Amino acid sequence: MKTMSRRRTLPDEQVIAATARVIGRIGPARLTLADVAKEAGLAPATLLQRFGTKRGLLLEVARAAPAGVADCFAQVRAANRSPLGAIFSAVQMTAQVAETPEVLANSLAFLQIDLTDPDFHRLALENFLATEAGYRTLIDEAIAAGELIRCDTARLARAIGALASGSMLAWAIRREGSVATWLRRDLETLLKPLRVLKIARPRRVKAAASNRG
């Protein structure tokens, strides 16, 4: 019986996606090039030749994050007629790193590297600022559309980003319902005082036929 040969080539995007899946399962500390090679269907030597080291591969994963932020915001904006709806969708997309409390814990382990390694921190900062800018653009559009009142959009964008991270952590500890529902409820609480109330206009009452001139 013939065994399937491993692929010799694979786009970097797919290798990075495979690495992210492995990180979600076991965290960056336990990850090896052999783990990623098995997930991607490549020979470990291929990854070694392409990325050099485990650190080199993890840097590519970190580098891909800020590059993909604009695409994520473009997707949610295209999928929502309402800018406010796009804000909710964008926040709920962050739940992808929290499929389970264990996956979230492994993702947070990557944050330890971001905060202690200067090269990783630079990329984490780029991702952070790009995400804030994406939220701020949607907030500006929501204000222009009459969905939110005028406010300090930079501070609100920062607050939304902080809420998303903190809400996922609270969900992982409490473990009540789905993380997406938890995120939505917390965001609704944050934005409720800023939402524009839609006051229904009273219908005009037609004059009675007896009063017509």
Image: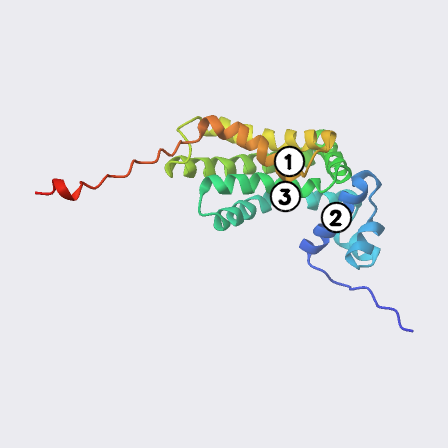
Question: At 61% across and 35% down in the image, what residue appears?
Answer: 183
Q: Residue furthest front?
A: 210
Label drawn at residue 65? 3
Q: CA distance from mark 2 to mark 1?
A: 19 Å
Q: Position of residue 164 (x, y in %)?
A: 61, 33
Question: At 13% across and 42% down in the image, what residue appears?
Answer: 210
> Which callout, 2 or 3, points to the residue nearer the camera?
2
Tell me which amino acid carries mark 3.
Answer: Ala
Question: At 79% across and 59% down in the image, what residue appears?
Answer: 41
Badge 2 density bin: few <14, some 14–19, many ≥20, Cα 10 Å:
some
Badge 1 density bin: few <14, some 14–19, many ≥20, Cα 10 Å:
many
Label drawn at residue 21? 2
Q: Residue furthest bottom?
A: 1
> Which callout, 2 or 1, points to the residue nearer the camera?
2
- Residues marked 3 and 1 touching at CB (< 8 Å): yes
Mark 1 = which residue? 124
Q: Position of residue 159 (x, y in %)?
A: 55, 28
Q: CA distance from mark 2 to mark 3?
A: 14 Å
Q: Quadrant of the N terminus?
A: bottom right
Q: Position of residue 102 (x, y in %)?
A: 78, 38
Badge 3 density bin: few <14, some 14–19, many ≥20, Cα 10 Å:
some
Q: Residue furthest left?
A: 213
Question: At 70% across and 33% down in the image, what residue appears?
Answer: 176
Tell me which amino acid carries mark 1.
Answer: Ala
Reading the chain from its start, which is encountered first: label 3 or label 1?
3
